[in-house]
Image: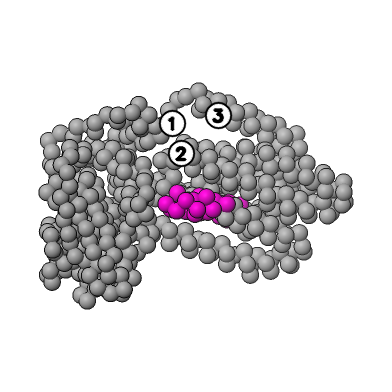
Amino acid sequence: MLLHLTVQAGSAAGVRRSLEQTANARLTLGRSAECAWQFDAPMVSGQHAFVHAEDDGFYLTDQNSTNGTLVNGVRIQRVHLRASDVIQLGYNGPQLRVELERTQAAPAPFDAFATVPAPPQAPPLAPAPPSAFANVGLYDPDKDAGKAPRSIGLGCAALFGGLLAFLVLVLTVSSLGIIPSFIGALTAFIPAVAYLLIFLWLDRYDPEPFAPLAFAFAWGSLFAIFVSGIFNSVFGSAAISALGSSTGDTLTGIISAPFIEEATKGLGVLVIWAVFRKDFDSVVDGIVYAGVVALGFAAVENVDYYGRAFTEGSFAGLFSTFILRGVLSPFSHVLFTSMTGIGCGIARETHNAAVKWFAPLAGYLGAMFLHALWNTLASFSSQVFFTGYFIFQMPLFLAFMGLLVYLVRREGRILRMTLATEVQRGLITQQQLDTVVSVFRRSGWVWSSLGNATQMNARRQFLRAVAKLGLCYWHVDRAVAAQSQTTSFTLIPKLQAEVFGLRDQI
């Protein structure tokens, strides 16, 4: 069966959206950009209501909207839609006429939770795909034990990373000496752990697994730093030979460093986007992965700065350098590379082919520009640098943090909107949804099971699976609105099965 909703009056009169009666089909209505069908009307709430399909037809559910949702003039909370019903989003708001169209009967798609809330045992698995390659790259909760699968490729990557780590260590010690290298490493890596915890806290709704985060840090601290060092040395030697020491060093900082360092760090974000695609859902994820890559790069780079400062000025020189790089500007590399992360995150969210290709490039250009501007300011006197720091760099960083907070809160709103269906169907409770979108409730709920490792691990997996389920619904909504495709649709029943299987363990 097909449901058609048609706007009755106003400038959008005649606009129509359709919904097919398939498992997990839904259409979100509201003023927010996260909704599949947006309405530019003041009486419509951000997430106003949603329509979803069940076995016996289509249902309309109000999402605690400010002005209410009416069907045939009567305010409703949840109602079974029938042909010729008139939906109104708020008093004097947009009116949508309901039409139902019967289609040729087809086998009912797998819906593990059509009889929720209390089936006696776990639902049957979905039918096997017709092709042996149909599930390549898709998330399979049955095979996800929280650890990366062993493979020849993973072993080769670990071996290559170990070789790079050895080379970076040898080059650092040979340049600085053992004691300065050790002191520089302590001074650089201890604060990096604290900054990393900030990113993990911000990424609370859909925490990234250990494997891609470790890959991101290793990429920044090993591959990006090693390749950038070689390229900058070659460029610097050529510039110094041609233009002299002072001018050559300045050009290396303004031209070579922004170009190659942001390229190598940005490449790491792109690799994560491609290889760990099931764990890369949004702009927030792009910022988190880019930030971790940048933290790895900055930590190893700071080892050299701190080691040289200790060699030349003992602990007094080390302290002044730490204040400058570890306190006043620890965010510099993070801010630069996060531009690339934002671009990759936008590409992950959009269904516009042009934006998908252009956004990462625009992000890289932004990262390169900010890096070049920072190094340009540093090439002048300390007075010019600090003037630029307080007038431009610090406000820019605060604006970036404001954007990040907004994006995190936006993820919370998305989860509340998309998971309302599962609350209605009984897969999760309203209390569990409130826990999923609250950092303090999440932490308290997990840590309240301290002493019971099995339950604590189940609660962590439950929170992650519920959040992934909500984001999959969101990707499906956006794909439907864009008349595009997304693998998230295939993941929904698998994540539902995972959540269902964890309910007795939490």
Look at the picture and state if 444 lies above or below 456. below
Q: Nearer the viewer, mark 2 or mark 1?
A: 2
Residue 440 in view here: no
Q: Residues within 10 Å of mark 1 (few under 14, many from 20)?
A: few
Dot 2 or dot 1, earlier in sequence: 1
Residue of label 2: 276
- Say which amino acid is labelled 3: Ala
Dot 3 or dot 2, earlier in sequence: 3
Give the left or right position of residue 376, taking residue 498 as reference: right
Residue 84 in view here: yes
Residue 43 falls within the magenta-colored stretch: no
Q: Position of residue 273 (x, y in %)?
A: 49, 43
Real-space Cα separation, disc 3 to disc 2, in angstroms: 14 Å
The image quarter containing residue 86 is bottom left
Residue positioned 13% across, 42% down in the render: 115
- Say which amino acid is labelled 1: Ala
The image quarter containing residue 117 is top left
Residue of label 3: 157
Tags 1 and 3 touching, CB below 8 Å:
no
Residue of label 1: 148
Front residue of 337 and 296: 337
Determine whether the residue tagged by mark 2 lies in a helix, strand or loop: loop
Q: Residues within 10 Å of mark 3 (few under 14, many from 20)?
A: few
Look at the picture and state if 432 lies above or below 212. below
Look at the picture and state if 144 lies above or below 188. above
Give the left or right position of residue 442, taking residue 354 as reference: left
Magenta-tinted stretch: 333-361
